[in-house]
Image (cartoon, helix red, strand yellow):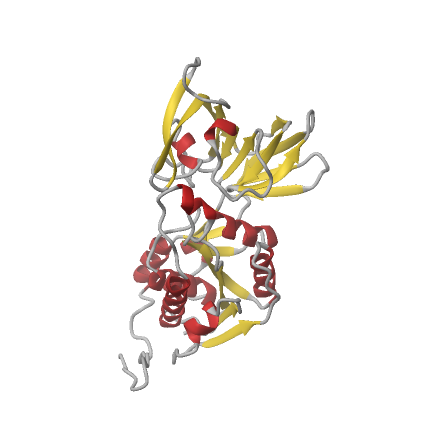
Amino acid sequence: MADGGALGIIVNPHSGRDARRLFARAGTSTIDDKRNQVTRIVVGAAAAGCRRVLLSRDAFRIASAATDALELPIGIELLELPTTGHAIDSERAALAMQAAGCGAIVALGGDGTSRSIVRAWRDVVLLPLSTGTNNVFPFQVEATIAGAAAGLVASGRLARESAAARAKIVEVRGPDGRTNLALIDAGLLVDDHPGSLLQADPTKLARILLTRAEPASVGLSPIGGLLMPCSAEDEFAVCVHTRTGSPHGRPGRILRAPISPGLYEDVGVDGAERIELGRELVWRGPGLLAFDGDRELVLAEGETASLRVVRSGPYVIDPRRALRAAAEAGLFLDLAPWHDHRGAGGTTCC
């Protein structure tokens, strides 16, 4: 097997445990769940021929507890980085893994976790796994298979082009010239507050720009998806014009949409517009721009922000596509004997 590059694994310990769960019917992703997922990712990567894995130490000991007892033919390195409990932790980890030559990263978290990684490393080769609440960007797939798919690409045994496609993103330029991005949705909210951790209130939502308008999802994406579906592969985006205030008792159509797990809301909509890639939109304040659910950019009265959707985001590994390509190339045939020693006694599987 080729040695190739290393696989990075970035875990957001706080994903799947935020305040939005109090106002919906979402499940919880525990620390133990994440530890077990990390273990399975490493096992999958090792079985696929990856020889080196990098993780970042965290305050909950997810990375160390997940890998301490593993006896596999793979080198495991824990990066010593400052931790704050905020998005900057994922950004620092991504930059460190880029510097260390990682060929791919598996991210455990939600849309926001992947967004933090992409902000630090725009053209990262990424396999996002869902552990958050209102997720569209990450996959919901068995972690073992995700590890195998990412390990194949990271090690160089499978070409990136055989497993990954470049994602669309929303590029944003604020009134001060600073740039930002969103992977799935940018929303313009009125009478809302920066830093709020709750899902967007539809009565405060004036506009949404979506790279993906997925009808079979939750969050802001299905507000567009139930009007004008748009997938990751489609070469366009969708802008939804919504009405603030109560949608009832006023002119206009009302859309019932799942804005969080187990939570539907009625949303006033004035229409959905197909947006060609590269077309610039200008949104005017007052209002608050949220990117993949994170409320970050305040627009004062008269201030503007420009937004456009372009296909210049991360290279996203599709685990199903990767494993199919591996099967067609026979990458799991006639390998060296496989040894996975589990527990004190050890169990050898060949």
In the rendered image, residue 222, in percent from the top left (x then y), is placed at 39, 34
Q: Residue at x 57, y 54 (%)?
A: 87
The quarter of the rendered structure image containing the C terminus is bottom left
The quarter of the rendered structure image containing the N terminus is bottom left
In the rendered image, residue 136, in percent from the top left (x then y), is placed at 42, 44
Q: Is residue 340 above or below residue 82?
A: below
Location of residue 331 by image quarter: bottom left
Q: Residue at x 46, y 35 (%)?
A: 235
Q: How many marks?
A: 0
| Nearer to me, 115 or 151 | 115
In the rendered image, residue 310, in percent from the top left (x then y), is placed at 55, 39
Q: Is residue 5 visible?
A: no
- Name, please, the residue furthest toward the right: 176
Q: Is residue 99 above or below residue 318?
A: below
| Nearer to me, 136 or 250 | 250
In the rendered image, residue 170, in percent from the top left (x then y), is placed at 55, 39
Q: Residue at x 69, y 24 (%)?
A: 302
- Name, please, the residue furthest toward the bottom: 345
- Name, please, the residue furthest toward the front: 22
Q: Is residue 342 above or below residue 184?
A: below
Q: Is residue 89 visible?
A: yes
| Nearer to me, 346 or 122 | 346
Q: Is residue 285 above or below residue 85?
A: above
